Image: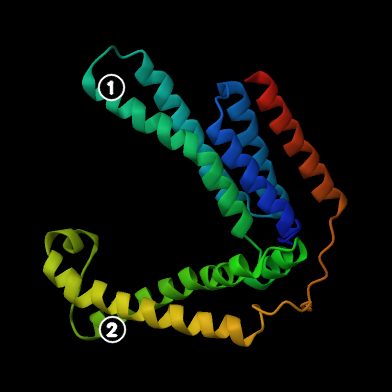
Amino acid sequence: MNKSVFDPRTKLAVILCASFTMMIPVGWEEECLFVTCLFLLFVWSGFWKKGLALYLLFLFLTWTDQRLFTQGDHLWVFILDFFSVGYRRLLPTIMAAVFAVSGTRNSEWMAALQKIHIPNVLLVPLAVLFRFFPTLIQDFKRIRQAMRFRGIGMNGASLFLHPIQSLEYLLIPLLMSAEKTATELSATALVRGLATDTRHTTVYDQKLQWRDAFVLLVLCGFLLGGVWLT
C-alpha cells in the first residue's frame, strides 16, 4: 500500500480543522466522531498502528473522565479530571499532526506550501523548522552514544537527579549543536533559492485526488456543524 495517499494540503487542512475543534465547545459525541475519523485516516494511509495507539489513548482518557466524574468532590479527583479532560482536548490536534507528518517528506511539504503561495518570509523559516527537529534528534542520539563510549551513562532518572552533569555532558553540547544546525539549515535554504520570488520547480506532481476532495468535504461538514451547534 502506498503510505502517502493524501496530498500535503489536505493534511494541512486536517490540522487546521483539528485546531478549530479544540477552540470551540463541542459535545462528546462530536469529539468522539472526529477522533474516529482521524483514526480512519491513519488506517487509510497505512499507519494503523500509530492511529490505534492514539485512538486507544483517547478512549482511555474518556473512560478516565467518566469514572472520575462520579468519584465525589475530592481535590485529587478535580486535579486528575482536569488533566484528563485537557489531554483529551489536545489529542485530536496531536493526532492530526502525527497523521500529517507520517509518510510525507519535507520536500513534499515545501512543494505544497509553494503551491498555495505561502510568502517567502514564512517559507524559509518553515523549511528550516521541518529539517531542524529531525536533525536535532540525530545529534542527541550521537551525543548519548559518545557519552557511552566515554563511560558516562545517563538514563532518564539521572537527568533530573544530577542536573549539573546533565547540563555539562548533554545540554551544553546539544545547544551548541542546535546553533550550528540552525545556521547550516538556514544557509542551505537560501542556497536552494527558497527566498527568491521566481517560480520554483519540483519533482513532486501534487494534484488533489478524489480521496482529498472527500476528506475536505468531511472537514467542511465538521466545521459547519461545529459552528451551527455552538
- Per the rendering, the mark at residue 139 is none
Q: Residue at x 35, y 33 (%)?
A: 83
Is the residue 154 above or below the residue 43 in the image?
Answer: below
Quarter of the N terminus within the rendering:
bottom right
Q: Secondary structure at mark 1?
A: helix
Quarter of the C terminus within the rendering:
top right
Q: Amino acid at mark 1?
A: Val
Which is nearer the eye, 193 or 22? Answer: 193
Is the residue 44 above or below the residue 202 in the image?
Answer: above
Q: Position of residue 211 (x, y in %)?
A: 82, 49
Which is nearer the eye, 176 or 77? Answer: 176
Q: Amino acid at mark 2?
A: Ala
For this orientation, the residue located farthest to the right is 210
Q: Secondary structure at mark 2?
A: helix
Quarter where residue 228 is shown: top right
Q: Position of residue 102 (x, y in %)?
A: 61, 59
Q: How is the image coloured?
A: rainbow
Residue 48 lies left or right of residue 185; in this view the side is right
Is the residue 15 above or below the residue 154 in the image?
Answer: above
Q: CA distance from mark 1 to mark 2?
A: 45 Å
Residue at the disc numbered 2: 146
Q: Residues within 10 Å of mark 1 (few under 14, many from 20)?
A: some
Residue at the disc numbered 1: 77
